[in-house]
Image: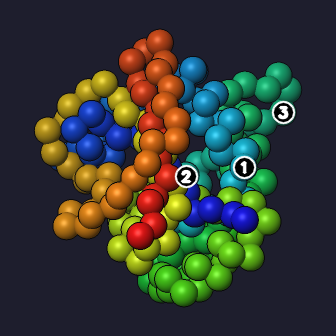
């Protein structure tokens, strides 16, 4: 059975972007990027809000031919998956295998995941917050970067209790730590 996975890169103090909206501190090194690639191979569909999609759509044009690089590998993984963008303002998409939905419907997402042949990823803290509040997220994968940014967009929604069970952890030479948690259902 497919899972809905929330995967994000976060600062040690829990932010996906800093107070200025920057995430340059979150650029993964090759070791982390290779781990991301390995985890993303199981994803068949990405769910994004408009802002996250606009960032991720750059992968549509990253070269994948020739000697396969870590970034080329990720671009191929990303392009092979379906994408659904939840936006009331986005008029058209710039990537293949992508469609726009005007509203995030938890029941429809639940059905999508239940019928999916591969895991579904939800990207971006705002859209993930909606899925977390609706009780849809099955797994959280946090790449924790060794930097405190002091404020910004939190990785998790405020005011929501989310019981988690540690599934896996991995340390990388540059100091980033991957923490994988299963969401515990009552």
Q: Quadrant of residue 10?
A: top left
Q: Residues within 10 Å of mark 3 (few under 14, many from 20)?
A: few
55 lies above or below 45:
above
Q: Residue furthest left?
A: 150
Taking the spot 31% from the left edge, 24% from the top edge, the residue there is 146
Between the C-alphas of marks 1 and 2, the distance is 18 Å
Viewer-closest of 51 and 110: 110
Q: Which residue is mark 3?
A: 65
Tell me the residue that label 2 is attached to. 56
Q: Position of residue 148 (x, y in %)?
A: 20, 31
| Element under disc 1 | loop
Is disc 2 surrounded by few (<14), some (14 to 19) or many (20+) residues within 10 Å?
A: some
Q: Which residue is mark 1?
A: 42
Relative to residue 77, is residue 111 drawn left or right? left
Q: Are marks 3 and 2 in contact (CB under 8 Å)?
A: no
In the displayed structure, would residue 100 be above or below residue 57? below
């Amino acid at each position: 059975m497919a899972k809905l996975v929330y995967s994000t890169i976060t600062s040690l103090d829990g932010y996906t972007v800093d107070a200025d909206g920057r995430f340059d501190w979150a650029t993964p090194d090759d070791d982390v990027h290779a781990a991301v690639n390995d985890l993303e191979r199981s994803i068949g569909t990405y769910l994004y809000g408009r802002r996250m999609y606009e960032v991720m759509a750059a992968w549509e044009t990253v070269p994948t031919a020739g000697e396969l690089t870590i970034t080329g590998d990720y671009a191929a993984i990303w392009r092979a998956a379906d994408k659904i963008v939840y936006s009331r303002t986005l008029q058209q998409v710039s990537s293949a295998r992508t469609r726009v939905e005007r509203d995030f419907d938890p029941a429809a997402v639940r059905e999508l995941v239940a019928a999916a042949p591969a895991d579904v990823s939800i990207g971006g803290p705002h859209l993930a917050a909606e899925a977390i509040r609706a009780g849809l997220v099955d797994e959280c994968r946090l790449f924790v970067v060794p930097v405190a940014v002091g404020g910004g967009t939190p990785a998790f929604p405020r005011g929501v209790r989310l019981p988690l069970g540690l599934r896996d952890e991995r340390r990388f030479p540059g100091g980033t730590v991957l923490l994988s948690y299963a969401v515990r259902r009552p």
